[in-house]
Amino acid sequence: MVSPGLSQVKRFAAAAPFAAAGAVFLLQAALLISCATTNPFVSVDGMVEREEFSLGAKTLEERRGDLYRKKDRVLYCLDRGLLCHYAGDYRASSALLEEGEKAMEENFAVSVSQEAGVLLLNDRSREYDGEDYEDIYLNAFNALNYYHRNNMEDALVEIRRMNNKLRDLSVKYGVLMTNMQKLALEKNQKIPPNPEAPVKFNNSALARYLGMLFYRGAGLDSDARIDQRQLLIAMADAPSVYPHPPPSSLAEELSIPPGMARLNVIGFAGRSPAKQEEVTRVPLGRTWAKIALPSMVSRPSRVVSIEVALDSGERFNLEPLENISAVVSATFTQKKNIIYTRSVLRALTKGIAAAVFDAMSETSQENAGLYGLLSVGAQIFAEASERADLRMGRYFPGKAYVGGINLPPGIYSFTVTFYGAGGGVLMARRHENARIGAGVLNLTEDICLK
């Protein structure tokens, strides 16, 4: 990384050679620190790759003090809550996801009340209040937690919460944006518009699919039909998120022949996107303002297809339902308007301090060197402190696939296989002696985060 601040430091070297040399060193050190990237989660990520979910959840608990700051309670709850879910520890997963959801609500309320106050060092100085997709999908996984615990009533409560959050998503940041605009006016600073326009997304096919299944399992057929229709509407309303047709098995979900049972399978594949930092520098005279923003980078899944093969001879493929990665990107653009405005305002505030000292160095012969060094110091602080907030949940899946088959009631064994390119097997999971009953929901869930 090269910074225009180095030339500025050298400009004042004649006035204060030793101090300027030290400033050069500090600036270079700050730049090296800001550019350095490390991943303290390497060992846990390896466990997840090997599907050692219980060990990964245990490691997160043991190393919580090393991996998470006090401001990152939401992240800890999300990461460990998901790994507990994948490991089949549904009670622990529910407790963690519910704690994380409560912390999100509390931290967001604090953000609304304090947004027009003091601008922080950078966004990492804030309590993490979660991304919208995290807040949405934690309810989906908690609904599955309750289903696996034979609690259909609370599973449906989670789905309703998910749908309510989606409905309110478009107005969630109204107060925050108003506060930021007021602060910009008070500081007499004009914020250029964010070029990224939000994508319309206020309905989830996955939420509607789970609602349809849970209502059907509870014997609430009219509610199940409503969610089936809403699933089709969700996919039609957001073609950029749902470029594929509805799953063909959807038509059979509410027309199970009398006396027959139905097996449903959900397959989660890949990993949701990660954040990376994008830096822009805006000239302010002979100094500059550094603007550091997070952007989403997809992590393509190696999973190409998913097949369910019953020992009794029946086979069917799971079909794409929801591209969670696309939802992540769609919902993030809405929050990014707030991040963008806040970051620009903060960067300009820091950059103007350096510009003022620089101007003073030009008009004061007696203290030119001192003001020059103060300008350099302000620039060093701005360069090192302005960092994008790259925090996010690490273990959400990237895609959801679904499928189902009607069967005579009975005991069945089957294998769910995740295939990669060229037909190679990425993961195969056996389900032995599963009871498939008539008139109840028989839902199996498998995951391959590769």
Image: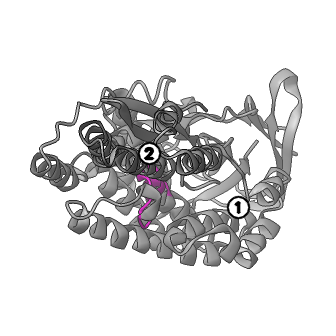
| Residue lying at 17% horizontally and 41% vertically, measured from the top left | 189
In which image quadrant can residue 300 be found? top right
How far across and how far down the image is residue 441, in percent? 58, 59
How far across and how far down the image is residue 184, in percent? 16, 47
In this image, 313 relative to 356: left or right? Answer: right
Locate the C terminus by quadrant. top right
In this image, 172 relative to 103: left or right? Answer: left
Q: Which of these two is toward me, 288 or 362?
A: 362
Disc 2 element: helix
Locate the N terminus by quadrant. top right
| Residue lying at 24% horizontally and 61% vertically, measured from the top left | 115
Q: Which of these two is toward me, 378 or 65?
A: 378
Q: Which of these two is toward me, 15 or 237?
A: 15
Give the residue type that dot 1 points to.
Tyr
| Residue lying at 55% horizontally and 78% vertically, measured from the top left | 95
| Residue lying at 88% horizontally and 35% vertically, measured from the top left | 425
Query: Disc 1 and disc 2: Cα gap in Å?
Result: 51 Å
Looking at the rendered structure, which numbered label has been put on residue 215? Answer: none
Q: Which of these two is toward me, 344 or 256?
A: 344
Q: Which residues are magenta?
A: 126-137
**Residue at the disc numbered 1:** 86
Figure colour scheme:
one colour
How far across and how far down the image is residue 323, in percent? 54, 36
**Tag 1: Cα neighbours inside 10 Å, few (<14), some, or many (≥20)?**
many
Residue 322 shows in the view: no
In the image, residue 83 above or below residue 222:
below
Residue 35 shows in the view: yes
Q: Earlier in the sequence, mark 1 or mark 2?
A: 1
Disc 1 element: helix
Give the residue type that dot 2 points to.
Val
- Residue 129 colored magenta? yes
**Residue at the disc numbered 2:** 376
